[in-house]
Image (tube, rainbow, N blue to C red):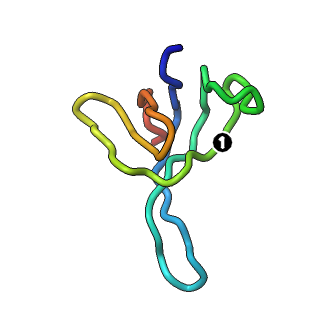
């Protein structure tokens, strides 16, 4: 299966009580292997492990996303 694509994405930081935690992406997700995530649904990823802007990829614990257009 192809990697899911995230469009119109933004980077957000996780809040852990009053402290800031890691980062995650939020945007419209396509081709996700989880059938509960509908095509184009706005959703959040799990915590980011890495993000590669040069190759348009973001890696979470279980999923590698292809980065589409960033939200402006």
Residue 7 in picture, x, y percent from top left: 52, 30
The tally of labels here is: 1
Nearer to me, 54 or 62 = 62
Q: Quadrant of residue 29?
A: top right
Residue found at the very far front of the displayed protein:
62
Residue 68 in picture, x, y percent from top left: 44, 27
Nearer to me, 4 or 68 = 4
On the picture, is 66 further left or further right than 4? left
On the picture, is 51 further left or further right than 41? left
Residue found at the very far left of the displayed protein:
54
Q: At 43% from the left edge and 51% from the top edge, which residue is drawn?
A: 48
Q: Quadrant of residue 35?
A: top right
Mark 1 element type:
strand
**Above or below: residue 47 compared with residue 51:** below
**Above or below: residue 64 compared with residue 72:** above
Q: At 67% from the left edge and 38% from the top edge, which residue is drawn?
A: 42
User: Label 1: which residue?
Assistant: 43
Residue 44 in picture, x, y percent from top left: 61, 47
Could you tell me which quadrant the C terminus lies in? top left
**Above or below: residue 27 compared with residue 66:** below
Residue found at the very far bottom of the displayed protein:
18
Residue 70 in picture, x, y percent from top left: 43, 36
Nearer to me, 64 or 67 = 64
Crowd band around label 1 with a 10 angstrom C-alpha radius: few (<14), some (14–19), many (20+): some
Nearer to me, 19 or 62 = 62
Residue found at the very far top of the displayed protein:
1
**Above or below: residue 21 compared with residue 42:** below
Q: At 47% from the left edge and 46% from the top edge, which residue is drawn?
A: 61
């Amino acid at each position: 299966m192809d990697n899911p694509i995230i469009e119109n994405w933004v980077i957000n930081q996780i809040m852990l009580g009053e402290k800031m935690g890691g980062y995650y992406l939020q945007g419209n997700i396509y081709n996700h292997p989880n059938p509960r995530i509908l095509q184009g649904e706005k959703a959040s990823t799990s915590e980011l492990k890495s993000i590669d802007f040069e190759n348009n990829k973001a890696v979470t614990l279980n999923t590698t996303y292809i980065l589409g257009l960033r939200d402006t």
